[in-house]
Image: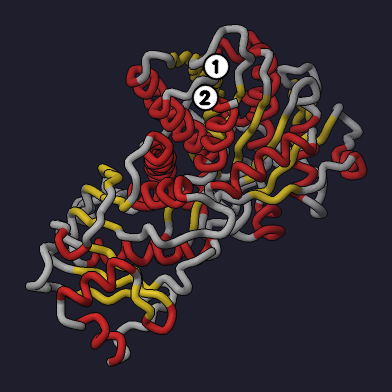
């Protein structure tokens, strides 16, 4: 979808398939609304007096034709006070206007929202979110549908504003984040028989071909065995699909600058292994690779924005299935770090692939390492579907990530990573157990990972609650591509 920024002085004389005009509380008219009202001899005022629209946030009213203006139609949009809107109210009205544009099959809309302001944010942020939400609205899943939903007809949004560099940059960043999210959504939504570890490797290679500053290398199981990745290989032991360790390197800055490393959990289907999951909703375990999907989506956004930063993506891709060769509860495996692990539950497999990937990450001498994983159901119990759980071995690093998420409405919440919880991972037969009992499951999972990331600035994002939604609107969300990309944008700017 194309985004254009243009100063529009007279709404009535602007030619567009659809003008989007703010209406404020109690029917107060915005500047463009007054212009349209005057040209139409008081039509908008009449509609307000009749009670057709009051100006409440998210209210809409489409006027399909007005002979007195050049635009083909006008969409009146309730914007509340219009001043210092909350971030949530602004996003609510944006999503509502996009819903109405889709409903009425609008191909190009001009948004005359220059009078709006959002508390704590500038005009650039508003343009960025408009571009982001517009691009997100274009996503349709169609890969395995014989009769997919029609493609979005919205091809262009024109924003009222000064066409300066800062606003163009904001628009570009918003679109790039959304494009990355849509890539992550597509990968997450694909069924496990299509989106295999090898498919993720193919997508990583394809991404590298699209960007000159990007390269991809793939480690097969033989190489993993040579490196001593016994934890990762223990997860893939029960499946015929070979595991892949996928490494994408983006070199956008000088070689002397240490890279930021993203580590994604890529379990393309998780049955639980020998500790098999209940059948209900097991289909949703195709989403257990959404950490990997978010990493690929973020790398796509980084490449699109040509950020002046070095980034390394590491994806630990495998299936977790039961068979005669599968790892059994009670087995002890040796990780790449040399630490032995007692596998008390084979359904706690994400931390096993991640711990070897985190050890591998150290060879890049990273400035920071962030792992992203649909790791624990306990995280969903703790935080629901709204916030990603954030853990870090450095509080100032956690604060940076929290701020990045807040800036793009991809919010996280910092959880404790206290030594008090480490004792739950004690084992009589290995250096560490892979589960810590029923209490604080998301925390003990993070504590497990912390034992493999002591030598660098590290954070863990548990996205089990935010990576997808269930029910009638089942599908991947593309989170936390926004948070990750915003963090890297800020590192690039710095």
Q: Quadrant of the N terminus?
A: top left
Residue pictured at 55% horizontal, 25% vertical: 492
Residue pictured at 30% horizontal, 45% vertical: 5
Query: Is residue 140 at all visible to an observer of this figure?
Result: no
Of residue 364 and residue 305, the one placed in the foreground of this image is: 305
Which residue was labeled with disc 2?
243
Name the side, left or right, on which 145 lies relative to 257. left
Residue 70, located in which quarter of the rendered image?
Answer: bottom left
Say the numbered circle drawn on residue 77.
Answer: none
Q: Are marks 2 and 1 in contact (CB under 8 Å)?
A: yes
Q: Secondary structure at mark 2?
A: loop
Of residue 367 and residue 431, the one placed in the foreground of this image is: 367
Q: Pinpoint residue 31: horizontal percent, then vertical percent.
A: 32, 68
Q: Between marks 2 and 1, how big is the CA–CA gap?
A: 6 Å
Q: Pinpoint residue 105: horizontal percent, then vertical percent.
A: 18, 61
Which residue is the extreme one toward the left?
67
Above or below: residue 117 compared with residue 338: below
| Colouring mode (rainbow / by chain / secondary structure / one colour) | secondary structure
Residue 235, located in which quarter of the rendered image?
Answer: top right
Of residue 221 and residue 456, the one placed in the foreground of this image is: 456
Name the side, left or right, on which 169 lies relative to 353. left
Which residue was labeled with disc 1?
221
Q: Pinpoint residue 382: horizontal percent, then vertical percent.
A: 71, 58
Q: Secondary structure at mark 1?
A: helix
Residue pictured at 38% horizontal, 79% vertical: 28
Name the side, left or right, on which 470 lies relative to 52. right
Residue 17, located in which quarter of the rendered image?
Answer: bottom left
Q: Pinpoint residue 488: horizontal percent, then vertical percent.
A: 56, 30
Which residue is the extreme one toward the bottom?
50
Q: Quadrant of the C terminus?
A: top right
């Amino acid at each position: 979808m194309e985004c254009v920024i243009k100063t529009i002085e007279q709404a009535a004389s602007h030619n567009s398939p659809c003008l989007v005009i703010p209406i404020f509380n109690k029917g107060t008219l915005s500047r463009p609304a007054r212009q349209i009202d005057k040209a139409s001899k008081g039509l908008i005022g009449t509609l307000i007096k009749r009670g057709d629209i009051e100006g409440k946030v998210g209210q809409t009213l489409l006027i399909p034709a007005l002979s007195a203006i050049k635009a083909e139609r006008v969409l009146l949009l309730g914007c509340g006070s219009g001043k210092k809107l909350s971030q949530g109210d602004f996003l609510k009205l944006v999503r509502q206007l996009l819903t109405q544009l889709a409903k009425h099959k609008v191909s190009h809309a001009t948004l005359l929202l220059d009078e709006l302001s959002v508390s704590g944010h500038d005009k650039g942020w508003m343009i960025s979110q408009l571009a982001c939400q517009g691009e997100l609205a274009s996503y349709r899943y169609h890969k395995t549908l014989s009769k997919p939903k029609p493609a979005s007809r919205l091809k262009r949004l024109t924003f009222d504003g000064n066409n300066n560099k800062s606003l163009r940059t904001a628009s570009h960043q918003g679109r790039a984040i959304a494009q990355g999210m849509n890539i992550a959504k597509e990968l997450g939504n694909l069924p496990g028989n299509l989106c295999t570890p090898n498919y993720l490797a193919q997508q990583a290679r394809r991404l590298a071909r699209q960007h000159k500053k990007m390269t991809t290398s793939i480690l097969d199981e033989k190489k993993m065995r040579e490196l001593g990745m016994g934890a990762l290989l223990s997860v893939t032991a029960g499946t015929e699909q070979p595991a892949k360790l996928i490494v994408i390197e983006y070199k956008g800055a000088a070689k002397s600058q240490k890279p930021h490393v993203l580590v994604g959990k890529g379990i393309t289907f998780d049955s639980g292994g020998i500790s098999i999951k209940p059948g209900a909703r097991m289909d949703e375990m195709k989403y257990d690779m959404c950490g990997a999907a978010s990493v690929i989506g973020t790398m796509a956004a980084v490449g699109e924005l040509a950020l002046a930063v070095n980034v390394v993506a590491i994806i630990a891709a495998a299936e977790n299935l039961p068979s005669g060769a599968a790892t059994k509860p009670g087995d002890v495996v040796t990780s790449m770090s040399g630490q032995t692990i007692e596998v008390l539950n084979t359904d706690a497999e994400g931390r096993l692939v991640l711990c070897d990937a985190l050890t591998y990450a150290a060879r890049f001498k990273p400035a920071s390492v962030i792992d992203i994983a649909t790791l624990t159901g306990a995280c969903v119990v703790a935080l629901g579907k709204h916030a990603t759980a954030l853990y870090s071995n450095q509080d100032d690093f956690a604060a940076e990530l929290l701020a990045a998420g807040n800036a793009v409405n991809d919010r996280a919440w910092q959880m404790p990573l206290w030594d008090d919880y480490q004792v739950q991972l004690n084992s009589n037969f290995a250096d560490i157990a892979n589960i810590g009992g029923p209490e604080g499951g998301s925390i003990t999972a993070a504590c497990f990972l912390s034992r493999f990331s002591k030598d660098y600035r590290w954070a863990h994002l548990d996205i089990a609650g935010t990576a997808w939604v269930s029910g009638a609107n089942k599908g991947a969300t593309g989170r936390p591509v926004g948070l990750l990309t915003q963090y890297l944008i800020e590192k690039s700017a710095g």
